[in-house]
Every structure is written in structure tokens, then in C-alpha cells.
Amino acid sequence: QRLRSSILGGPLISVGRTMQQDRRLVVLAVLAALLILPSEAFLPAGPALRPAPGASRFSLRPRDASLGAPLAPARQPRARLVQGGERWAPMMSTADAAEVGVAASTLTVGIPKEVKPGELRVAAPASVVGMLTKEGFKVVVERGAGTTAQVSDEAYEAAGASLTDTEGAWGADIVLKIAPPMESPATGKHEAEMLKEGATLVSYIQPQQNDALVQRLKGLKVTVIAMDALPRTLSRAQTFDTLSSMANIAGYRSVVEAAAAFGRMFAGQFTAAGKVPPAKVLVIGAGVAGLAAIQQAKSMGAVVRAFDVRSSVKEQIVSAGAEFLEVELEEDGEGSGGYAKEMSPEFIAAEMKLFKDQCRDVDIVITTALIPGKPAPRLVTKDMIEVMKPGSVVVDLAAETGGNIETTRPGEIYTSSNGVTHIGLTDMPSRMPQQASELYGNNIVKFLLSMGPKGRFHIDYDDEAVRGCLILDRGTLTYPP
């Protein structure tokens, strides 16, 4: 009560108290003030520091990626919500923010048509163009860019974009793309050569596999941001993670393709004509694509089993409704970036035995295993295919990087001599172009808008998400970070 009275303005010193008692009361009042007043009140003059959403009052560092790591002395964190995304940067006044980067109102964003054979998606559909124009960007779209994704030119114009030709879209300040630049069958020109000096390309690049392309872009003195190099373990980067968005679609679509090729129903039934057993599905690899495949197969009534070398995904597999298969050898396959690592020869031998036993029993096998920067690991061999029942189906989602199944033919669907249908399609997301374009467009545009203060475009080297996927900065190689 004495302390409360002091803080609320009551006398600190009363008649009859000793000097020592008064001193103690003053100390208690000061300590109380430190707890009650906001922490900003005790900071020196200068740029204000505020706790970010989700952070505690006394922790200015986001809790997601740092896990208690000390704040870097050169950075003053701040959180700004951008269309569902979040970034960390110094708190700054309106005047300071106006000096960062380039005003969006002076920049043009170009959306060219994809020329890769079989690619039906568009990098940014009309549904996300409004996000760009609201920020101040001018948007130009190549005529017909969204036709194969069920997005008309009229829809783009209604969203505030202008229509242009191929060179007009590639001549923009910022170009949004899906497939890495390649030679255009229509013009005979390499797409990269249509970029102007100083432009920014945001696209898939696959820098570890496409060194020749990186060197070509380097010579053009452009800035390149590879969406496939985004640090996927960074919590706030999940909003921008195009690989996860496309893997989710691929996993779902793999089950749809398998069901179309399979000669029986997925769900078991009891009918007047007799009992129909449910299909048995094995999913190898429980990343985003694998979990999507598990959920879809389970929802269609199949009996689902799954295997992954990472023991940490067991709970996710079980919660999705599948049986988690294990080998009798303790070894964890958790690798960097959320991917699996290469396993020991002893583990692989035990793994191969498990897969062969499962191939004798199941009707459908779906493989999803990838290792960044390396060919896909070989998981299903020819002798495993030979023990499968006629009418069985195998779907290889790693076909584009060599395949997990020895008998896969990338880009093809065929039936082997023993009656096993092989699906080695490399364009699963593109087989759902409208949905895939919407998700990819949301990811890439939210990332673009998160890169600087409102109304500004800025390459921030202190932003872990931006730095992780920055391949070139005006022709200077910045990858790996």
C-alpha cells in the first residue's frame, strides 16, 4: 500500500519514518517504475525500438528462427505485416523510409508468357495484380500470358495491368517468371537477352544446376532472385515458399493420376455383388508432397503406409492417417533445409529390403524423395517393380531430377511388361494451372512487397529471406550467401 501510494503521487517521506526506511521505499518505487513503464522510455534518443508482434516485451528478436540467438549489433528489428507476410527491419520515420530503395511508383513489373514446353502456369494471375498496383507498381502483362491458366487478358486489364508484347514484358524493371529463362521457340531469342541492364528477375533459377545460365545473367549485369533458393527453414519465409506450394499440388495430383490409371476403386466396399477391398498405397518421403499425397489417398478411402528416413516426421505421418514404416536400424536422416540427408550403406540395405517386401503387397507406390543440388536418390529398383502385381501403379514425383524409381521414364506414362503402370510426369503442378498460378503468384508477390518499406523496392542484405535467394546483384555473384 505504501508503494502504491508513492507511485500514485503520495508522499515518499512521512513524519516519524527514519531516513533508512525512506531510502528503501525510494528504491522500491524505482524498481516498480522499471516494471510498469514501457521499455522504450529507458532507451537513449534515436531510432525507436518496439517489440515485434509475437515477441515478448524484453525480446526484440523474432522467436521463430533465432531460437534465443543474440541480436546482431548492426540491426534494429521491426516487424511490418505485408499482405500476410512479415519482415524484420529497422523502425524508421516516414522520411527515413522514403530514402530506402526505389519508389514503387517509378518501377514497372513485367509478367511474360512461359515458353517452356508443357508449362501452363503464369507467374502472377490477375488475382494478385491488385496487390502490386496498390503498392504503386505499374504492371505490364504479355498478351496471352495467362490464357493456359484460365486468366484472360480482360481480367488483367480489369485488375489494373496493361497489355504488351513479349519484349515489353521482358523490358520491365522487375520481371516475374516461373521457369528459368531459356531460348524462346517463338522468337529464337534467349529470354535472358531481353532483360535490360539493371533489371531484377524473380524466378526459379536452380543455380546449383544451371551455372551456364547464372554466368549468362551475370554478364547482363542484372539482379537475380531465385525463388527456389529461399531459406525454407526460416519461419516467416513460409508465406513466400513457392516450392512448398507447388509440392502440395504435386502430391495431391499424384494421387489423382494414380487413381485414373488404377483399375479399381480406392475405397473398400461391401456390395450385393461381393466385397471390394481398399487399395493399398505406399508413399515414400513425407515432405510437403508426401503428406499431401497421404491425405488425399486417405480421403479417397485407401489404406496408406508411409516411410521417411527422418524420424521427426513420424507424428505428421500418423496424424495424416497413415501407418509409419520403420527399419530395424537406428539412424536419423534429418538434413539441412528441411530435406533428408544421404544415409549409410547399412541403412540403405535395410531400407531396400523393406521396400521390396512392401512392393509385393501394395497396389500403388508414390515416391517424393529429393536431395538439393543432387540427383534424386534411387529407392525403387527394377527387381522391386518385377514383384508388383499386374495393374499396380507407380508415380515418381522426382522424375525431373532422375527419378526415385529405376524404371521411370521422365515425362512419360507407360506400362511395363509385367503390367505395372509408370507415371513419370514432370509437370504435376502445371496440370492444375489455375490453382498453381494463384498459389505461386501469392507467394512471389507477397515476397516482393515484403522486401522494403511500404511503397518502396529494396534489396536488403540484412533480410535473411532476401539474402538467401539473392543470386546476382547487378551482375555481382552473391550466391551462395
Image (tube, rainbow, N blue to C red):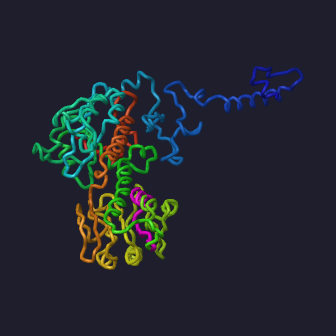
Seen from the viewer's position, the closer of residues 3 and 94 is: 94
User: Magenta residues, as a range?
Assistant: 274-295
Is residue 415 placed above or below 38 in the rendered structure? Answer: below
Q: Is residue 143 magenta?
A: no
Seen from the viewer's position, the closer of residues 169 and 174 is: 169
At x 32%, y 33%, the residue is 129
Q: Quadrant of the N terminus?
A: top right
Image-quadrant location for residue 34: top right
Q: Is residue 277 magenta?
A: yes
Image-quadrant location for residue 15: top right
Image-quadrant location for residue 18: top right
Residue 264 left/right relative to 301: left
- Residue 417 visible? The answer is yes
At x 25%, y 55%, the residue is 209
- Residue 473 visible? The answer is no
- The spot of residue 291 in percent (x, y) is 43, 59
- The spot of residue 406 in percent (x, y) is 27, 71
At x 42%, y 35%, the residue is 83
- The spot of residue 402 in percent (x, y) is 26, 64
Seen from the viewer's position, the closer of residues 231 and 312 is: 312
Is residue 60 placed above or below 40 in the rendered structure? Answer: below
Outermost front residue:
272
Q: How many marks?
A: 0
Residue 260 left/right relative to 8: left
Is residue 361 placed above or below 83 in the rendered structure? Answer: below
